[in-house]
Image (cartoon, rainbow, N blue to C red):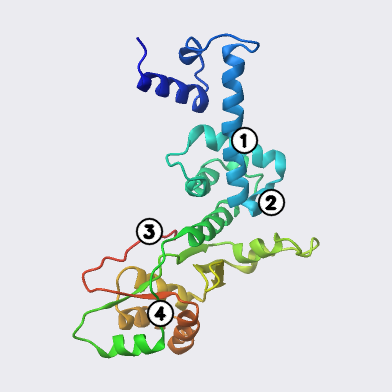
Amino acid sequence: MRTLHRHQVELRAAIVESAFAPFASAIVPARLSPREQLDIYRHHYVLTLTEALRVTFPVILQLVGEACFRAMAARFIERHPPVAPVLFEYGDRFADFVDDRSELSGGLPYLADVARLEWAINLAYSADDAETIGLAELVALSGDSSSGALLGLHPSVQLVGSPYPIDLIWRANQPGADPAATVNLDRGGARIVVYRDAELDAAWRSLTLGEDAFFRMLNRGATLDEAHQAAAVHGSFELGSTLSWSLNAGLFVKLPATANPQRSFPP
């Protein structure tokens, strides 16, 4: 006798893995055969996940074109079915998939890094909220050496790096951009901080080498002084101006001394 659990397992296998035979025997034939009925659900499943990827990775779609994107999405969906019921959480492994399947990227070596930037934008939208600190709180925090408090990054903050100018590539593929514009890949790499702004929209800013080192040190749990020292190795770093714009952007939160703020960022 079939149990509900067995029904669920076999139905999932039919839809996600195209393993139709086991569940087909439980379907009463009608105008459509059991396989044809299951194909309808399978098609809707792939279509829904493909659309979710299109929404999250619009620049990748723009770069490779509709047919190539659909082929990439179909392969990704087959290899990486969703593990959570929320569609905006789907696609966390897409950039790595693009990296591993270079034959699908149309010869674009920067494609995976552009996908990482788009995923970071998606994470910034959906990240948990946290109370940010302003200049007054930072001054008080810096003067309270006995508290052992740490200066952390807001949960929406994501750091993305690439040897390619993915910031310019992203901008060149936005609605309204000059279609004749080109990006010189020899320009050098990009370091980007992505965050959620006061209007609850995802925003990002290109970083200098020093700023990138500064934020990555803070993310690893370094004190403000330690992060400053690491950033100061790069002569262009200015602590005052960096703190000014990042405080205005709401990038910082105060963490207790026992907190472990480390999160995993792409290099």
The vertical placement of 126 against 98, above or below, is below
Dot 1: what SS?
helix
The vertical placement of 189 against 102, above or below, is below
Dot 4: what SS?
helix
Tags 1 and 3 touching, CB below 8 Å: no
Compute the Cα span from label 1 to label 4.
Answer: 46 Å
Residue 103 visible somewhere in the drawing: no
Q: Nearer the viewer, mark 2 or mark 1?
A: 1
Q: Nearer the viewer, mark 3 or mark 4?
A: 3
Compute the Cα span from label 3 to label 4.
Answer: 20 Å
Rendered image: mark on residue 264: 3
Q: Amino acid under label 1? A: Leu
User: In the depicted view, which residue is nearer to us: 33 or 112?
Assistant: 33
Q: Answer with mark 1 or mark 4, whichever residue precedes in sequence.
A: 1
Q: Position of residue 29 (x, y in %)?
A: 58, 8
Mark 1 surroundings within 10 Å by alpha-carbon count, few (fewer than 14), some (14 through 19), many (20 or more): some
Q: Answer with mark 3 or mark 2, whichever residue precedes in sequence.
A: 2
Q: Position of residue 74 (x, y in %)?
A: 59, 34
User: In the depicted view, which residue is nearer to us: 156 or 119?
Assistant: 156
Which residue is label 1 attached to?
Answer: 47
Q: Answer with mark 4 or mark 2, whichever residue precedes in sequence.
A: 2
The vertical placement of 226 against 186, above or below, is below
Image quarter of residue 202? bottom right
User: In the depicted view, which residue is nearer to us: 197 or 219?
Assistant: 197
Left or right of residue 93, residue 33 in this image: right
Q: Given the current orientation, which residue lies at the most extreme right position?
A: 180
Left or right of residue 66, residue 120 in this image: left
Q: Position of residue 150 (x, y in %)?
A: 28, 76
Which residue is label 2 attached to?
Answer: 63
Q: Answer with mark 1 or mark 3, whichever residue precedes in sequence.
A: 1
Mark 2 surroundings within 10 Å by alpha-carbon count, few (fewer than 14), some (14 through 19), many (20 or more): some
Rendered image: mark on residue 240: none
